[in-house]
Amino acid sequence: MHCNTTLTKDEIIRYSRQIRLAEVGKEGQKKIKGASVLVVGAGALGCPVLQYLTAAGVGTLGIVDNDWVDETNLNRQVLYSLKDIGKPKPLAARERLKLLNPEVTFNVHFIRLDKESALKIISQYDIIVDCTDNFASRYLINDACVILNKPLVYGAIHKFSGQLMVLNYKNGPTLRCLYPEAPHPLEVPSCEEFGVIGSIPGIIGSLQATEVFKIILGLDGILSGKLFMIDTLNFNTWISSFERNPDLAMITELGEYEDNSLCDNKSVKEISSDALRKMISENQKILIIDLRDKEDKDDIGFKTVSIPYYDVSRKVKLFSGKEAVVFYCRSGSRSTTVINYLQKVHKMENLYNLVI
């Protein structure tokens, strides 16, 4: 963070309400102006984070995302409008944020953060904010921040609830100190499958921005080593503490980070309809799982059990004692993901992808 920053008369007027705070003042506002923050993910969480950091006058904001604005984003990603549909999110975000505060410098990184780019991009900023929606990215960001000694503000949302914590702050606990290994994508809920009410990312994103301000200003009460959780249906809140584990927090290089799709066609056995009928005639202990959504129920000519693919991890016991388990989805991608998961995590065999 740059300490020799000065404030213009216009900036003193613009930020007068926060400058009046004893915890901020002019010196604190200079710290905010001199700070650089990287927001990874310009979606549901990233939108409020970016809006409040921009409005408060953070000097440099980096925006990382490789997605485009879609109509389904608009219920919760309130930075965008119908006119932005089809635009790259980082570019659309910069365009909107410039109208809010033209004095902020915006660096656009229209890229998916990966093992090759993470260290290079993260090294340019003082504070990192994780607004992603998958564990592969979260662990990549965490590990890169540990290597580069960068504080990380983490947020997550689900349905009517959310989580918040600060990681790697002044040699504090990291994500791996709480969760040593990333869960498999099929074992954790996602907004795409279970949904999220639009106001929840607004709440958690606003709190993430607040933690950023506290870090910049050096205030007490930062959520380092503390996991804050909120359930807005009952308006219950919890804070769970966790400590740094020196062994788990010792990261010197980036590892391998699996993508959500986890599709490895080479390890998946395919079976045709004719071959499946022959197998059924020879062995009745065959279970056929239909992974399609409820609205996609064309008859495939077999007696099936309907299980949404994101619910497979909770139904594993159903597959035990079967000579073979056959999975079907229209494209084959979900079947491949599920079979890879069951083979890798549960060491199951005799799994087939039905190709019609």
Image (cartoon, rainbow, N blue to C red):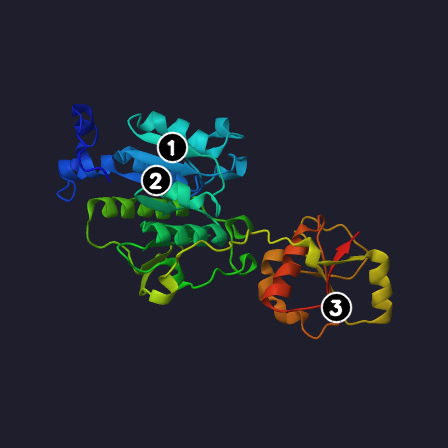
Q: Position of residue 274 (x, y in %)?
A: 86, 58
Q: Is residue 37 above or below residue 168?
A: above
Q: Position of residue 135 (x, y in %)?
A: 48, 54
Q: CA distance from mark 3 to mark 1?
A: 52 Å
Q: Which mark is residue 124?
A: 2
Q: Secondary structure at mark 2?
A: loop
- Which amino acid is tagged 3? Ala
Q: Nearer the viewer, residue 51 or 148?
A: 148
Give the number of the mark in front: 3 or 2.
2
Q: Quadrant of residue 96?
A: top left
Query: Does the image show residue 308?
Result: no
N-term-proximal mark, 3 vs 2: 2
Q: Is residue 60 above or below residue 338?
A: above
What residue is at 78 percent from the left and 62 percent from the top?
Answer: 303
N-term-proximal mark, 2 vs 1: 1
- Which amino acid is tagged 1? Asn
Location of mark 3 (residue)? 324
Q: Position of residue 141 (x, y in %)?
A: 42, 50
Q: Is residue 323 left or right of residue 117?
A: right
Q: Secondary structure at mark 1?
A: strand
Q: CA distance from mark 2 to mark 1?
A: 10 Å
Q: Is the residue under label 1 in contact with that under label 2 (CB below 8 Å)?
A: yes
How crowded pointer 3 is (Cα within 10 Å; few <14, some 14-19, many 20+) is rated as: many
Q: Which mark is residue 236?
A: none
Q: Secondary structure at mark 3?
A: strand
Q: Position of residue 100 (x, y in %)?
A: 32, 28
Q: Quadrant of residue 146?
A: bottom left
Location of mark 1 (residue)? 107
